Amino acid sequence: MTGTNTPRYKRIVLKLSGEVMAGPQGFGIDPNQAATIAQKIKTIHVLGVEVAIVIGAGNLWRGNIGLHHGMERSTADHMGMIATVMNGLALQDALERIDVPTRVQTAVEMNKVAEPYIRLRAIRHMEKGRVVIIAGGTGNPFFTTDTAAALRGMEINADVLIKGTQVDGVYSADPKKNPDATRFDHLTYSDALNYRVRVMDLTAITLCMDNQLPLIVLNIWEDHSLQAAVLGEQVGTLIEGD
């Protein structure tokens, strides 16, 4: 870590997979995992960074399971959207417990538990120092939460989209299968599309390219990786224009 605490990015969208909420068993919601992620988010919130979070639901439901049993794709996707709200509420609780004011908004309206996603309201919350967890995906089937994160990034005028994963960037091949795989510090959008980067949905990358939204892929579990990224330090892989 360097000595400066001036963020390079004022407003970010952090994309998290549902798996970050699961314990060692790989499914469900583990409060200890939620607490760990919340602490990482707090390290950038205290710097004055405006944070929106889009979270997946792979720890609770995977649509492919339903599809393999003949379920309609729309039904499977709507179940996943609802599951993201459960993850969002768990993460909100973890953040509020460490004094980080948080609001959950959802594209699938359920007014008893969360606010409806309203772009200007989300921006206003962030301007007031609140973290906003945007659940429910895009509100439409056939779109991934990666794509939802890119879309929300455009809508709220984010400076960067950060994809928090279990790998420390984008590689030329699967590093678990190929020990000679090369990690990239920087890629253009075109490079990422040509490599068919697996850590991010191609539709999401295309959206980022069309709207010139920088994308950082990093290992969310590495110490200080998220904080280093928002401070502008080299961490993970930065995907941006030529």
Image (cartoon, grey):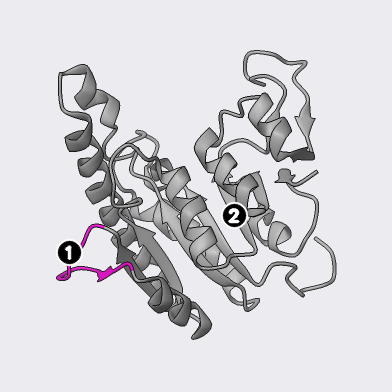
Q: What amino acid is labelled 2 in the image?
A: Leu
Amino acid at circle 1: Met
- What number is the disc on residue 93? none
The answer to whether residue 45 is visible is: yes
Q: Determine which quarter of the picture holds residue 45.
A: bottom right
In the rendered structure, the answer to whether residue 179 lies left or right of residue 44 reads right
- Dot 1 lies on which element? loop
Q: Nearer the viewer, residue 207 or 216?
A: 207
Q: Quadrant of the N terminus?
A: bottom right
Percent of width and height locating residue 225: 68, 53
Which residue position is annotated with label 2?
Answer: 161
Furthest toward the right, the residue is 3
N-terminal of the two: label 1 or label 2?
1
Residue 180, located in which quarter of the rendered image?
Answer: top right
Q: Is residue 222 visible to the viewer in this orientation of the structure?
A: no
As drawn, 41 above or below 142 = below
Q: Which residue is mark 1?
A: 110
Residue drawn at x 54%, y 64% is: 41
